[in-house]
Image: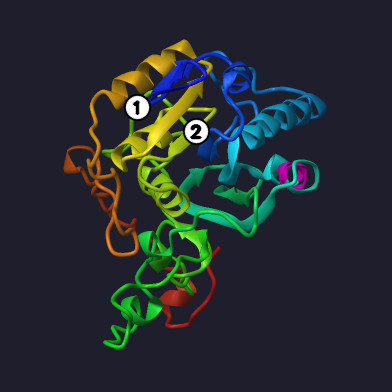
Amino acid sequence: MSRNGIQLDRVHQGDCLALLGRLPDASAHLAFADPPFNIGYDYDTYDDRRSSDDYLAWSRRWMGEVVRVLRPDGTFWLAIGDEYAAELKVLATRELGLTCRSWVVWYYTFGVHCKQKFARSHAHIFHFVKDPAAFTFNVDAIRVPSARELVYGDKRASPTGRLPDDTWILRPQDLPDGFGAASDTWYFPRVCGTFKERSGWHGCQMPEQLLGRIIRASSHAGDVVLDPFAGSGTTLAVAKKLGRSFLGCELSESYAARVTERLGTISVGDPLDGAAEPLKSAPATKDGRRLTAKRQPRPKRKPSATARRGKATLVK
């Protein structure tokens, strides 16, 4: 199967603008993009240190092409960092005519440690549609357990669960007040170095379960899923497992080769990697490893003379 001579169900190596330019109008049902954030990340071929004007002009070009190749009832999901989230949302809605259905916050722990600001532990994921009156949203495919079931163990809880909130989080039980199961913070772990799911060769790997929610919600079996920045190939791998056709582009020759290798190891119907329900289970680690911290003996402190006489004083 192909689109204008471009073979489906594979990753194509090259510039995404060249690939998108060869695709016919209205040829994809769903697009997911996790583009470079322009924050100086060390890619092997791409320069992630553009001027702001250059980055926004480039974003306008590739996003415009994505909108063109989407079907009239198509959906576009965009993952982006803090630096350009606002600008790209305005670009998509004010200039490209898309409607934003949800502004999802994906929360995770194991965020990048920062020395002079709070550690970042979230990303923005925009859910855009071309036609607000006609788009795919498969409610039953993405239900999650309700707080009534998880927190209170109430037998009245619906066995089918409820729709997720638009904040997706890693471990709500780690938060003082918790997050509801249906909030707008999405609960998925970042793919850390010790996780079994980790490819080991790409530093910005998306979790399969997160892409699973997006693809299940916004497409049907046999639909075409497009990813102009294939990266580690997670979108394409999940699309294949879920029985969708897919088309990816990757600038790096090395990354594209590894994505092709990854796709060759999976089949339609394979289970997604990662915790199937992160509210109830934790992601597997490589070889089942768990680190056990050794408790260091606390040094004995010599009491002050005042303390020895039974008076409480502050010893600095």
Q: Quadrant of residue 163?
A: bottom left
Q: What residue is disc 1 on?
A: 200
Relative height, residue 222 to residue 280 (above, below): above
Q: What is the three-letter code of the residue carrying label 1?
A: Gly
Q: What residue is disc 2 on?
A: 226
Residue 298, x across and y down, in percent: 32, 57
**Over which residues does the magenta segment extend?**
87-92
- From where the camera sits, is residue 231 visible? no
Q: Nearer the viewer, residue 268 or 193?
A: 268
Q: Residues within 10 Å of mark 1 (few under 14, many from 20)?
A: few
Label 2 to label 1, Cα distance in Å?
24 Å
**In the rendered view of the protein, which quadrant contains the C terminus?**
bottom right
Residue 280, x across and y down, in percent: 29, 64
Q: Please give the name of the residue rendered at 23% of the width and 49% of the height, measured from the top-left corner.
A: 292
Q: Please give the name of the residue rendered at 39% of the width and 77% of the height, measured from the top-left corner.
A: 147
Residue 151 magenta-highlighted: no
Give the prevailing secondary structure in the magenta stretch. Answer: helix
Q: From the viewer's perspective, tell me whether residue 261 is left or right of residue 252.
A: left
Q: Please give the name of the residue rendered at 36% of the width and 43% of the height, measured from the top-left corner.
A: 208
Q: What is the three-letter code of the residue carrying label 2?
A: Leu
